[in-house]
Image (cartoon, rainbow, N blue to C red):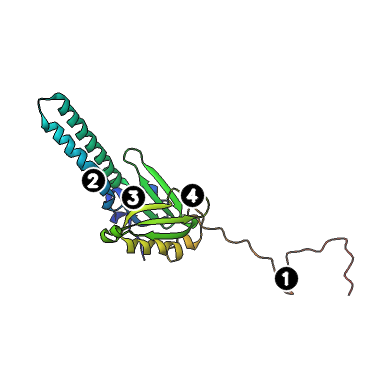
């Protein structure tokens, strides 16, 4: 298996991969959340937009209703624009070492979880998620509660689950199961064992001066 190369990613995701991954770290998954995450903001936006348009057109000569309509329209458009922008800018990235979630339109935020700390992975799909093709990842990690414990509206259930499971439970990727610390550095080699003497015993000890010879 081989993960996506940066040049094959969308522009925004490629920038995040190039900016936040460590040297030698490779992106296996890089995707934004499913478009279904915009269903709720759209349902909230449409009534406000229609009410604002109605107030604006109700009585064009009435400054109060017209101003109220403009305020409602601008507020609805600003709210919806921010939600769409956040969806566009947020990326779920899984590398050979870490899970990252980049977010923020004006201020960029990067939340990460080392793969070595993940002890269990749960994939959940609701009925609507099965129809539209999205689900929720739930990570169980060692230590305290992590900010990445649950990520919703992730697309491509079957492919995404196989890729992440391969990273967690197989050493083929050179990832979590293959060793290394939380930052992706290779574990140091184990200390050398005791030296062996000519007769097969330990050769790393010296006789202590002053002791009487052993009686045979």
Left or right side of 57 for 147? right
Identify the mark nearer the N-term, 2 or 1: 2
**Residue visible at 12% across and 25% down in the picture:** 62
| Mark seen at residue 43 | 2
Q: Position of residue 93 (x, y in %)?
A: 37, 53
Q: CA distance from mark 2 to mark 1?
A: 79 Å
Identify the mark nearer the N-term, 1 or 4: 4
Q: What residue is shown with label 4?
A: 145
| Front: mark 2 or 4 | 2
Contact (Cβ within 8 Å) of mark 1 with mark 4? no
Mark 1, other Cα within 10 Å: few <14 / some 14–19 / many ≥20 = few
Identify the mark nearer the N-term, 3 or 4: 3
Left or right side of 25 for 6? left
Identify the mark nearer the N-term, 2 or 4: 2
Q: Position of residue 117 (x, y in %)?
A: 49, 55
Q: CA distance from mark 1 to mark 4?
A: 51 Å
Q: CA distance from mark 1 to mark 3?
A: 59 Å
**Residue visible at 45% across and 65% down in the picture:** 169
Mark 4, other Cα within 10 Å: few <14 / some 14–19 / many ≥20 = few
From the viewer's side, name the closer residue of 64 and 213: 64
Q: What residue is shown with label 3?
A: 91
Q: What residue is shown with label 1?
A: 197
The image quadrant where one finds the N terminus is bottom left
Q: Position of residue 186 (x, y in %)?
A: 51, 57
Left or right side of 208 for 96? left
Q: State whether residue 26 appears in this view.
A: no
Q: CA distance from mark 2 to mark 4?
A: 32 Å
**Residue visible at 31% across and 51% down in the picture:** 14
């Amino acid at each position: 298996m081989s993960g996506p190369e940066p040049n094959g990613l969308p522009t925004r995701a490629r920038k995040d991969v190039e900016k936040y991954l460590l040297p030698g770290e490779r992106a296996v998954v890089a995707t934004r959340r499913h478009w279904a995450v915009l269903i709720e903001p759209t349902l909230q936006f449409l009534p406000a937009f229609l009410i604002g348009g109605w107030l604006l057109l109700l009585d064009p000569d009435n400054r109060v209703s017209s101003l109220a309509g403009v305020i409602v329209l601008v507020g609805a458009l600003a709210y919806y624009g921010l939600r769409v922008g956040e969806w566009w800018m947020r990326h779920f990235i899984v590398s050979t070492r870490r899970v990252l979630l980049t977010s923020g339109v004006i201020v960029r935020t990067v939340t990460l979880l080392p793969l070595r700390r993940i002890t269990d992975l749960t994939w959940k799909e609701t009925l609507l998620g099965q129809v539209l093709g999205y689900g929720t990842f739930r990570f169980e990690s060692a230590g305290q509660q992590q900010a990445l414990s649950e990520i919703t509206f992730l697309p491509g259930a079957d492919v995404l689950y196989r890729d992440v499971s391969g990273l967690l439970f197989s050493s083929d990727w050179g990832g979590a199961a293959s060793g290394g610390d939380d930052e992706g550095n290779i574990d140091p080699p184990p200390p050398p064992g005791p030296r062996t003497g000519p007769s097969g015993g330990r050769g790393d000890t010296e006789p202590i001066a002053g002791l009487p010879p052993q009686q045979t």
